[in-house]
Image: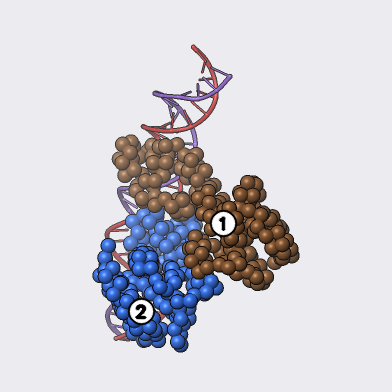
Chain colours: A brown, B blue, C red, D purple
Amino acid sequence: MTDPEAIVFVVDDDPSVRRALQRLIRSAGFTVESFASAQEFLGLPRPDIPGCLVLDIHMPGVSGLDLQDELAAAEVNLPIIFLTGYGTVPASVRAMKAGAVDFLEKPVDDRALVVAIHQAVERNRRARLEQAEVREIQRRVESLSPREREVFSLLLTGMLNKQIASELGTTEKTIKVHRGRVMEKMQAGSMAELVRLAGKLGMR
Amino acid sequence: MTDPEAIVFVVDDDPSVRRALQRLIRSAGFTVESFASAQEFLGLPRPDIPGCLVLDIHMPGVSGLDLQDELAAAEVNLPIIFLTGYGTVPASVRAMKAGAVDFLEKPVDDRALVVAIHQAVERNRRARLEQAEVREIQRRVESLSPREREVFSLLLTGMLNKQIASELGTTEKTIKVHRGRVMEKMQAGSMAELVRLAGKLGMR
DNA sequence: GGTCCTATTGGACCAAGGTCCAATTGCCTT
DNA sequence: AAGGCAATTGGACCTTGGTCCAATAGGACC
């Protein structure tokens, strides 16, 4: 159950904690990168592979919760596991509400942490796949001409070519051509497929 | 911002707490029903309207977390707000992971509780609407004959009538009839609509 | 200016879908 | 045994969808 193609980022201001976590997580089969502060973590580019973040709550400067907010604002979708020496209930609730995978108290139970990391990485892997798919579909939509896009969205309402033509002030024949191009550019082999593609973009 | 058509259940073993919560929540515009224990709450039928549950963690007998598990197992989808006198981080994390709306420490901040209740009730209202819709669609699918259901699922793959006919070992004409009945029974005015209905049931 | 590309439109023609009519067969319930 | 329902099929006819070929208009580019 190891995964060298996943990376775990550790952010903790205590060097001895970092060393211990590094050892533990590496032995669980993950690549690990450690940082002493949120700033340090934010300053470096992150490889574009599945991973998660193991984050101490209490750090001088930017706290773990602050970093969570910043990552969310920057749309960095990296699952977070919080560690805390003297965590409070409100802090844990806030973290969990904001989507943290887990919130563990130090001294951390090695097994619990490894389990949480596996869950977090798996969650991230799925999210990344989903994201890649959505982006690909988005790319296809962007390849549509303005007119094709209009036809596309009217197609999704279930209108007939004739109705679309009247709606757009043109003829059915023209709509047929647009329709054919929409199917081609969206790489949809059928109406069913086209509707599902649109659904993945939240188009109704 | 009141809502007499929503009900808030309070479960707490302390009578004075129940009275105080009752007063607060009622003044926020909700109907309230109080219970001294999880058993008492489970023993009575619940009206089929939007609502939520305000639940003390520490109670003799069945604890709040136990009740949360039981409700989940019974597929009772009632959002929960936990209250606790001396809550621990692990308990709050467990509760939040299991889907709790909030986890507040006593003495409870009246405003925070009322906000949480509004969120919980709203969440439940949406979930109930969604659920009702899914059930209605499910009902329609169940009204399909076995053959119609086969045609339905093959339609979703984007196959042509001709292909479906060959797949099912019959003729295109027959499929046309089934297809028409599927559209009628599913109350779908177009392929787009049919595909979306199926999507709501998780059919791919 | 000339060329290339895209968006848009049109005509002709064929394939696929939908509907109205009617009928047969097999199974289950009453 | 009789009735009801599901499944199936057939014919005829019309609508809708899809494709091939072609043309026009407006911009971008050389």
Give the label on residue A93, or none: none
Secondary element at tag 2: helix
Quadrant housing residue D22: top left
Q: Establish if B184 lies above or below A173.
A: below
Query: Which residue is pictured at 36% across the width and 51% down the height?
Result: A158
Please state the horizontal and vertical placement of residue B39, each as a whole percent of the image: 40, 86
Question: The residue under label 2 is which amino acid type?
Answer: Val
Pointers 2 and 1 within a single chain: no
The chain letter under disc 1 is: A
Query: Which residue is pictured at 64% across the width and 58% down the height?
Result: A12
Question: The residue under label 1 is which amino acid type?
Answer: Ser
Secondary element at tag 1: loop
Give the label on residue A63, or none: 1
Query: Could you classify mark 2 by the number of other residues whose Cα lies within 10 Å: few (under 14), some (14-19), or many (20 or more)?
Result: some
Query: Which residue is pictured at 38% across the width and 80% down the height?
Result: B11
Query: Which residue is pictured at 54% across the width and 47% down the height?
Result: A136
Inspect this view and state whether residue B96 appears. Answer: yes
Please state the horizontal and vertical placement of residue B89, each as a whole percent of the image: 53, 71
Please state the horizontal and vertical placement of residue B204, each as a whole percent of the image: 49, 61
Give the label on residue B17, or none: 2
Locate residue A86 relative to residue B38 in the image: left or right: right
Inspect this view and state whether residue A29 appears. Answer: no
> Between marks 2 and 1, how big is the CA–CA gap?
35 Å
